[in-house]
Image: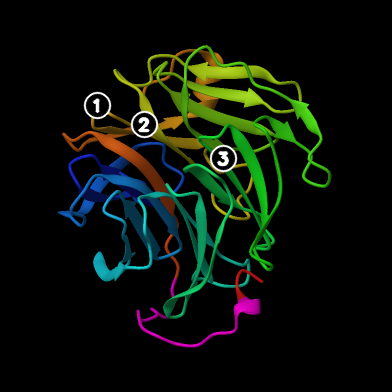
Amino acid sequence: MSLIAGSYERFIWGFKLKPQTHDPSSQCLTLTQIFSYPSHIAPITTVAAAGPAAASGSSDDTVHIYDLSSAASLGPLHHFNSSITSLSFYCPPNLSFPRNLLSAAADGTISIFDTEPFVLLKSFRSHKKGINDLAVHPSGKLALSVSRDGCLAMSNLIRGKRSFCWKIGVHLAEDARLLLELDNEKRVLCAAPGESGILYTGGESRVITAWDTNSGKVAYSIEDAHSTRVKGIVVLTKDGGSEDDPYLVASASSDGLIRVWDVRMAIKGKPNPLAEANTKSRLTCLAGSYLKSFKRPKIGKSTPKEEDAAE
């Protein structure tokens, strides 16, 4: 398992999460740094990872691509007129390398890239104001985005067009019907979906909260998870994992710490982190990925068909 974090100081951080013993089921974990260097000329605002690929976006209007298996940079993408605010990979279940990279920007646009090679397929405006976050549907045909205009939008990635825009909450995807709203006392800065309808959120409260999206109530929480605001949450669950897999959640904070938690312990009381790494920088975002064998694509020019985007 690899964790990727970005920082206000322009550094990208890479860590390997692995057991301290030879037993893969061991709960004694360690975060080992695999790389760290200043990849942007402005603060890093977002990171994404899938399989052996990772990407970072910045307020310098660029996206950088990385090969996690060799801890190497594959180069930048220069197709943007505004700060990059969110990144998301789309990886079909039958592929070991993501097929598409989606980026969201401060000017309200969403861009779709093919990853073999990394080339721009389509760009369209989804919001009137800057996009805060972006997520791709498992089908690869739809994306959800939230914006500074207070709007939750669903976009059709095949047509490159927004389908609807609605007040932020839990909605039914078929008709945008609002199911429930989650009441947070302080501003939420990050979120990640978990198993069985659980949604993890973090923010200015310094708490990791697990919401039951069926009832809209708090299932459990990790109080004082960090000394300052939580800026990133990743659910560390293997695809096709069994019930015996540990329930691990990683968090990153402005205090510079990356922590890994067993959320089952949060139900019983305040847990201690299973692993921790101190980057000594102001972290802004976090992403995670399981490495698989793959054929690395090259960054270059090609003329793929637009209808192949996120198909």
Checking the image for residue 255, the label placed there is 1
Task: Identify the image quadrant of the C terminus.
Answer: bottom right
Reading the image, the residue beneath label 3 is: 146
Q: Is residue 38 left or right of residue 122?
A: left
Report the residue at 83% width, 43% height from top.
Answer: 175
123 versus 242 height, above or below: below
Q: Is residue 223 left or right of residue 14?
A: right
Q: Amino acid at mark 1?
A: Asp
Magenta part, dominant SS = loop
Report the residue at 71% width, 32% height from top.
Answer: 170
Q: CA distance from mark 2 to mark 1?
A: 18 Å
Residue lying farthest to the front in this orientation: 128
- From the viewer's side, name the closer residue of 295 and 177: 177
> Residue 19 at x, y = what percent?
35, 45
Q: Residues within 10 Å of mark 1 (few under 14, many from 20)?
A: some
Report the residue at 42% width, 62% height from top.
Answer: 291
Is residue 191 within the magenta segment? no
Q: CA distance from mark 1 to mark 3?
A: 26 Å
> Residue 262 at x, y = what percent?
47, 30
> Residue 219 at x, y = what percent?
63, 19
Is residue 298 within the magenta segment? yes
Element on which disc 3 rests:
strand
Q: Earlier in the sequence, mark 2 or mark 3?
A: 3
In the rendered structure, which segment of residues is drawn in magenta? Answer: 293-308
Reading the image, the residue beneath label 2 is: 274
Q: Is residue 133 left or right of residue 8?
A: right
- From the viewer's side, name the closer residue of 25 and 172: 172
Q: Amino acid at mark 2?
A: Leu
188 versus 289 height, above or below: above
Q: Earlier in the sequence, mark 1 or mark 3?
A: 3
16 versus 111 height, above or below: above
